[in-house]
Image: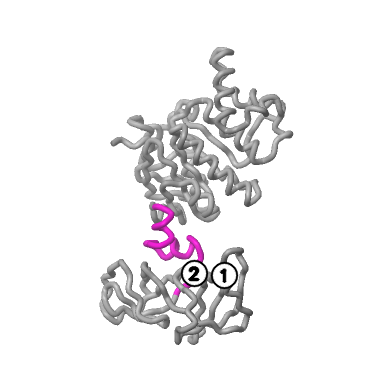
Amino acid sequence: MTPLLDLRDIECRYRGHTVLSGLSMHVNQGSLVCLLGPSGCGKTTVLRAIAGFEPIYHGEIAIGSTTVSRPGYALAPEKRRLGMVFQDYALFPHMTVGDNVGFALRKASAEERRKMVARMLKVVGLEAFKTRFPHELSGGQQQRVALARALAAQPEAILLDEPFSNLDVDTRERLSLEVREILKNEGITGILVTHHQDEAFALGDQIGVMHEGRILQWDTAYNLYHEPYDRFVANFIGQGAFLTGTMLSPDTVDTELGQLRGDRAYQWSKGTRVEILIRPDDIVPDPDSPLTGLITQKAFKGAEVMYTLELPSGDQVLSLFPSHHDYAIGARVGIRADMHHVVAFSD
């Protein structure tokens, strides 16, 4: 199957500095994918290159069977049939909500424009706001108007550039789920860039973790958390700590927490020193365990409490206890490792 969007080994530069290098990805029709990474990793440059706002110096970008970018050539952005949703909404303040949504339909008849605007406002749940102006709306409502405007042009795909960053946490989480539902219902392909993991996990079928202009791992949220293939990905995704261990066999490591056996086989020889990724959900309370941890920090999270635990060696791990296990800082608690995924990196 030909992907809707295909980036092959692209390179982008800015003022002589290479921003992207050797970057490849493909997106199938109807998929929702995210590029996730820290500021400055190049994720917005990828989006701008897809949209046609940035030239590429190597490789090529194809939409369907059409090459839209290659060195020395770039199809104009307005001819790529891509919708854009920006961080700052980019609504016209002097236009009503209805006029903003219908702006991309200037060549359509008045009746076609009226029907499409009505349909898009219904899709985003803003039918009652058609005659309002942007300043009369909340941030979440303005972002839904921006999405409706992008959808009204019936694009091949929607590009979303940090679209929820100006919103508070609760609105951001709710809207990211709403946008996913809207795009899935409409069968629209979506590409989101963000530095918020919660957004990427809520919206993306697949997520590419970026660092220094490259995609380090392209995977599901579950695999990025439980099966990271790169030390940066392991450190960037979720929370966790690293403990030193010694390989006993391809799938078993001896650590301060005991012998840990997982579902991944490594090629290192017996006796190799490695570092093991320990997630908070890998450490569980066990009052009968001979292994204890000293509580040095605690953070109440409602149904759970995140404890920072100091092991006898002085190394620290994180653990999520049910919130009815309420211990004071300075207390010692019995713990044990309960791991199905042993993720090791060369020490």
Q: Amino acid at mark 1?
A: Met
Residue found at x 48% / y 51%: 201
Q: Is residue 186 left or right of residue 101?
A: left
Q: Which residue is disc 1 drawn over?
A: 306
Numbered range of the magenta stretch:
220-242
Residue 335 in sight: yes
Q: Quadrant of residue 129?
A: top right
Q: Which residue is disc 2 drawn over?
A: 280
What is the image's colouring?
one colour
Residue found at x 47% / y 68%: 281
Q: Amino acid at mark 2?
A: Pro
Residue found at x 60% / y 47%: 172
Residue found at x 56% / y 37%: 85
User: Which residue is at the front of the view, 332 or 190?
Assistant: 332
Disc 2, SS:
helix
Q: Is residue 107 left or right of residue 90?
A: left
Look at the numbered discs 2 and 1 and tell me whether their residues touch, using CB distance below 8 Å.
yes
Residue 70 in sight: no
User: Which residue is at the front of the view, 264 or 209?
Assistant: 264
Q: Earlier in the sequence, mark 2 or mark 1?
A: 2
Give the alpha-carbon distance from disc 2 to disc 1, as whole Å: 8 Å
Q: Is residue 10 above or below residue 285?
A: above
Disc 1, SS:
strand
**Alpha-carbon neighbours of circle 1 within 10 Å: few (<14), some, or many (≥20)?**
some
Quarter containing the N terminus: top left
Q: Is residue 226 above or below residue 24?
A: below
Toward the right, the furthest residue is: 136
Q: Is residue 190 left or right of residue 196?
A: left
How far across and down, in percent of the image, does residue 137 sit?
70, 35
